[in-house]
Amino acid sequence: IASAIENNVEPTKLRSMMWGIDYFPDGSIWFTDEATDAIWKFLIDDESYNRISYSQNDEGKSSLPQKLVIEGSKIIINDFTGGRLSFLDYAQDEQGLLHYAIPSVMEDAVTSDFAVDSDKNVWYTNWVPGGQGILVKFDYPGYEFQSTQGEVTQGLLLQDFVEWYNFPVGLTTPNGVAVGPDQKIWLADTSSNYFFSLDPKTEEFTKYVTSIPTIDSYGDASGFIKNPVSRPYWIEHSDGNLIMNEHNANRIGVFNPSSETLVEYTVPSRNPNWADCEGIEYCGVAQVFDFAVAGEKIWFTEWVENNIGVVDTSIPLPFSIAIDKDKITLEKGQTTQITLEVTKTGSAHMYDANVNSSSTSTFSDIIITHENNFSLSDKTTISVEIMASEHALSGTHKVLLGAYTDDIAVSQFITVTVM
């Protein structure tokens, strides 16, 4: 491609995934290109392209430049399969672009998404597929200052500028990373229904759960899907909320960590070829991948539907929920009653709704019992039983409780402590 551009001839047609894109203050657009193992710079004014090679020096080592974020004069990129975090910097090199990378601290690990906190530390993940993983904090300002004083060796880099935290139980494939309110770090786990927060002050992780996907997203025509998962992929912070694409549930989730409420917007587009949908009329997912937030709108791509969609969060929700308890403590074998109130807020006529519930507990430690379907009029009161099983492990769990329709789910978290 680079040779074709230089010689003004038509390049060989390729198919690629452009994972990351951002705008640089000099009037250029930068994006990653997996197929040609490159970073591309597009100058808007003269509509010209400049290809920057992104190859690994290690023979036989693959690269996949993925997410790309511009932070001041720096361009930060994660190399997913190469297991490194790369920095391209104009300000540090008068002759052009300075390129250096932090290799993975784990052998055979991938490097996924990253985020920058208020102190300019860069947070990212290293994890071995099917194995262990760590959340890494890179003191970029400290490294940058030290590098101006002299050469920084690889040993000094790892020892003095990098801290890491072992993944908690249940976190295996954290593709998405975000810095949220109060500088907490948020991770989306693509192998499950879970997302997590880390409080760097206490070094404690908290585990949350999305709604269980509805059957029209995954289909289950074969009858083999016993535990459907939503697969939250990317996660971003915007105006006090955490936003994530629930890849396998065909939803966009908006989580408020202050109120611990979760609103999930259903994407209407369906592609049956990407789910277990044989013989089912309305079924499938649109493969909602990347998204961007502009004000109260969330713009997103539908990868297999060739669409760009938008969620307008300024539109009032069709119903609200209220729960009489947000914290409960249970002995093993004990049951408590929760009251869920669902109130219709719009002028629409009565319509069908469903009770929504899920839990972060494993092995049925927490058992939730309630009616499933109801007709939503002005206000509906529903009794929900939450029980700690006789063999439950002691610990703290999150229970998600609310209601959903075909278009939207509105839920709130309850903290359940098993003694």
Image (tube, grey):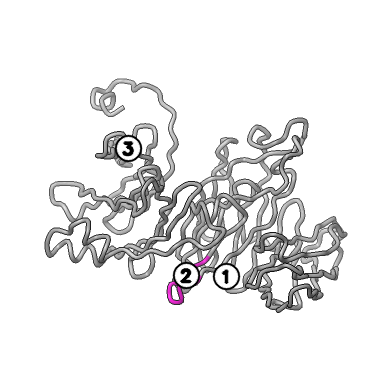
Q: Estimate the x, y position of residue 277 in percent, counting from the top left.
A: 72, 35
Q: Estimate the x, y position of residue 105 in percent, counting from the top left.
A: 34, 54
The residue that mark 3 highlights is 61
The residue that mark 1 highlights is 257
Residue mark closest to the camera, 3 vs 1: 3
Secondary structure state at the residue bearing disc 3: loop
The residue depicted at 70 percent of the width and 43 percent of the height is: 217
Front one among 149 and 3 = 149
As for residue 104 lying within the magenta part, the answer is no
Which image quarter holds the C terminus? Answer: bottom right
> How would you rate the neighbour count of disc 2 (Cα within 10 Å): few for under 14, some for 14-19, many for 20 or more?
some
Report if the CB atoms under discs 3 and 1 are less than 8 Å apart: no
Three-letter code for the amino acid on which mark 2 is drawn:
Lys
Q: Estimate the x, y position of residue 44 in percent, counting from the top left.
A: 33, 42
The residue that mark 2 highlights is 184
Report if the CB atoms under discs 1 and 2 are less than 8 Å apart: yes
Report if the CB atoms under discs 2 and 3 are less than 8 Å apart: no
The residue depicted at 45 percent of the width and 72 percent of the height is: 203
Q: Estimate the x, y position of residue 157 in percent, counting from the top left.
A: 24, 60
217 relative to 375 in the view: left or right? left
Give the residues in magenta. 197-204
As for residue 199 lying within the magenta part, the answer is yes
> How would you rate the neighbour count of disc 1 (Cα within 10 Å): few for under 14, some for 14-19, many for 20 or more?
some
Which image quarter holds the N terminus? Answer: top left
Three-letter code for the amino acid on which mark 1 is drawn:
Pro
Q: Earlier in the sequence, mark 2 or mark 3?
A: 3
Label 3 – label 1 distance at C-alpha: 40 Å
Give the tally of numbered discs. 3
